[in-house]
Amino acid sequence: MSKVITPARFPKPRGYSNGVIAPAGRTLYVSGQIAWDKDARIVSPDFATQFLQTLDNVIAVVREAGGGTEHIVKLLVFVTDLEAYRAATGSIGAGWRERMGRWYPAMSLVKVAGLLEPGAMVEIEGVAVLPEGA
């Protein structure tokens, strides 16, 4: 199991971990995912819905490789609208707990001017460390 690292002099992180030590295993790099469905359509113009679909798509890649949400050690989140993100944190947090429980990998969130796919407001890439044999 991964171990969360929080220096004693740091404030308690909310919604992320400062560092994660992952056990030995196979490393999976998940390319940037957006909120599209199996037909490559953005699922909704709603920010929280896009965020959670994007997270679901990252989780789907990890599961396809034989891992689970507990194997995700790093996420990099790109958003086009910080105010929409802040306004949606309640819905995002509830959806996060449904999918990830209380596991918070090391994460960064960056505001960007835009994403490649028209209508996309969120893109998430990740790193997972899968157990040997997964």
Image: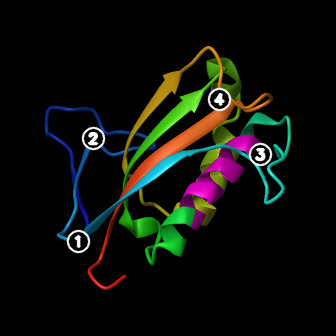
In this view, the mark in front (2 or 1): 1
Please state which amino acid type lies under the numbered disc 1: Gly
Q: Mark 3 points at which residue?
A: 49
Mark 2, Cα crowd under 10 Å, few <14 / some 14-19 / many 20+, is: some
* Left or right, residue 77 beside residue 3: right
Q: Which amino acid does label 4 sit on?
A: Tyr
The magenta stretch is 49-60
Q: In which quarter of the image is residue 117?
A: top right
Residue 26 percent coordinates (x, y)? 27, 69
Q: Where is residue 87 in the image (x, y as percent from the top left)?
A: 70, 28
Determine crowd level at label 1: few under 14, some 14-19, many 20+ residues with C-alpha closer than 10 A.
some
Q: How far apart are marks 1 and 4 (CA)?
A: 33 Å
Q: Is mark 2 on a helix, strand or loop?
A: loop
* In this view, 49 is above or below 84: below
Query: Which of marks 4 and 3 precedes in the sequence?
Result: 3
Residue 7 point in image, percent of width and height: 15, 40
Q: Name the residue under label 1.
A: 25
- Residue kind at label 3, given as amino acid type: Thr
Question: Mark 4 sits on what residue?
Answer: 85
For residue 64: magenta? no
Q: Which mark is residue 113?
A: none
